[in-house]
Image (cartoon, helix red, strand yellow):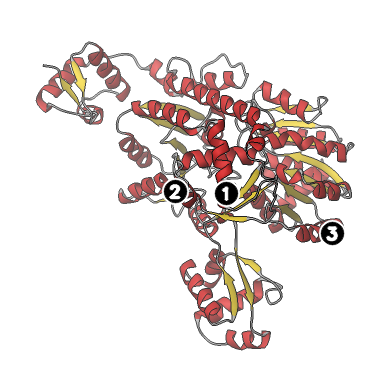
Amino acid sequence: MSHALEILKKYWNHNSFRESQEKIINTVLENNNTIVLLPTGGGKSVCFQIPALLKDGICIVISPLIALMQDQVDNLNSKGIKAVAITSGTSQDDLITLFDNIRFGNYTFLYLSPERLQSAFIQEKIAQLTVNLIAIDESHCISEWGHDFRPSYRNIKVLKKLKPTTPIIALTATATNEVLKDIASSLEIEDAIIFKKSFYRNNLAYQVFTLEDKLGRLLQICSKTKAPIIIYVSSRNKTKEIAAFLNANNFKASYYHGGLTSSTKQEMFDNWISEKTPIIVATNAFGMGIDKDNVKVVVHLDLPNSIENYIQEAGRAGRNEDKAFSAVLVHKNDIRLFKERIENTFPTIAEIKHIYKSLCLNFQIAKGELIEEPFEFNLLAFSERYKMPVNKVVATLNLLEANSIMQISDGYNKKSTVQFLSSSKQILNYSKSENKSSKVIQLLLRSYGGIFEQETKINEFWLAKKSNLLSKQVVEILSKLHSEELLAYKKATDNAELYFLVPREDDKTINSISKNIQKYIKQKIKKATDLLAFIENDTLCRNIQLLNYFNENHPSECGICDVCLSNKVSFQDISSEIINYLTSKKLATSKEICQHIQSKEGNVLVNLQQLLSEEIISINNFNQYYINK
């Protein structure tokens, strides 16, 4: 293990190294097939990255998310470790060059999606490589019983045929015993050694609050917390709205969702990491690869999609082992809306066929034709043109992508490009002038090689930071230089790129995957039902409920979740005080009643429920209580 520790000291913070990671690394180094279940924050990446660095050859990493792949590649490259990712936009010519570089350039890691692995050309090139390890990230996607099943993951076993003696390590943060067995079977590694760390977190209090004034409670939580907070919501618009609400109430908050440009994402993320804005409001697009150990509270203002999603998101709190909290804020209407969303989200097979055919018509693809070039795709424009609900189009695209019919690459993952058009002499002369444009030109010349010969990807936000300008100013400067024909500047658009992966065959295309789709939808509905059962069960310790779900036995109660705490609170009859207050006040919310009556909030809510059941009081549409006449 001494060599591994040397690598840790060189590239990682070895002080955070755990005993469980050491055992896994030793097992992988012994060329054993391995399945690793480490909950969020458990340090899964190190378990394959260190063994790969200690062996000759290259490690192939299969990952489902382009953003996550690119993040890991950038992180490795920043440490001087040569890594590359094959994404959906890589052309055949680029692939030839890329594989030549891999073979002769001492690369250590090759990241690719399960969909790209299906390419016969890529398989042929992989067969020519010396592969020291195959790492399958987010391996629960292999199982139809997992919370994010992707049929393309089922075909990863082709790597075992290409490299039969290369060990495989499959990693996940969330999997039941059923899923773990399915992973081993699908990868044909039934002899795999399984490492499974408990989901139990003795420092993390799982708490579910049913209340009327969620925003009021959110302000209370933010007031009491002097450490970083993550607030999860279900829509992109809501991230901006809630962040604005918090800023208006004198908190420092930023927002994050998948539709932001890469530079804006980076800015929001950096502001949160540096705690310039210690509160971040986000969709579930925020989370993968986050390594911030002092998050104190994770708030779910909307219900998560599944228990797996919930435990991953909540688990981002308290990684420094200090006391931390997960707070799910639930209004009585949330349950109804959640059920309606589940019912209305998933398209029927007939709707999927109609949307697929409309996509082919929209891009003028003839029957039997396969066009391998990407199409620029605007979701809202397409939905409006063909009079289809946006949520059904999104769900269909996700299903078609999961079943390798097409692939969609978000525009915000693309990067802007620059290429100098004038001679190097003209550019150098221009850069000598004393103005903001010259600062940007000088930075481009210092930072990007080959910028005269070819289009070069740039990051406007990074350029802005390095030149002490605003991102907006950098964009304006590059646009001006473009208009003056000194350089060609292509700004990344917010549109997506759509790739068709199979020839158009209309109904036949969808019929071939209809069973997969129906299984997937059935499983998604089950996951949602399990989540609701967890939220509504206020009689059994939250920790025990979660551990039972993941097939763990833990007989003792945690003592810190909302259920355990409510069991400790002895009931006090304060109904007469509530009645007297409502008699004088006429109308009052539970928050106002709690502020007036000196009793614990839980006790007030229990008394209110009792008075409602006895029909002594009622509640109106504005969540105000009043005395029945």
The x, y position of residue 264, in whole percent, is 50, 58
Q: Is residue 15 above or below residue 542?
A: below
Q: Quadrant of residue 62?
A: top right
Q: Residues within 10 Å of mark 2 (few under 14, many from 20)?
A: few
Secondary element at image label 3: helix
Task: Give the residue at x 64% y 55%.
Answer: 374
Q: CA distance from mark 3 to mark 1?
A: 38 Å
Earlier sequence position, callout 3 versus callout 2: 3
Name the residue that disc number 2 marks. Answer: 384
Residue with the mark numbered 1 = 361
Q: Using residue 72 as the reference point, say whether residue 216 is left or right of it.
A: left
Per the rendering, the mark at residue 2 is none
Q: Vertical placement of 300 versus 489: above or below? A: above
| Three-letter code, disc 3 | Asp
Image-based side of 112 in relation to 27, left or right: left
Q: Is residue 483 above or below residue 101?
A: below
For the residues labelled 1 and 2, the Cα–Cα distance comes to 15 Å
Q: The C terminus appears in which quarter of the rendering?
A: top left
State how far apart marks 3 and 2 are (Cα): 45 Å
> Which is more foreground, mark 3 or mark 2?
2
Which of the pair 370/522 is nearer the observer?
Answer: 370
Image quadrant occupied by the N terminus: top right
Disc nearer the start of the sequence (1/2): 1
Residue lying furthest top = 614
**What percent of the width, then of the height, locates residue 422?**
64, 84
Q: Which residue is mark 3?
A: 100
- Amino acid on which the number 1 mark rests in the picture: Leu
Does label 3 or label 1 sit earlier along the sequence? 3
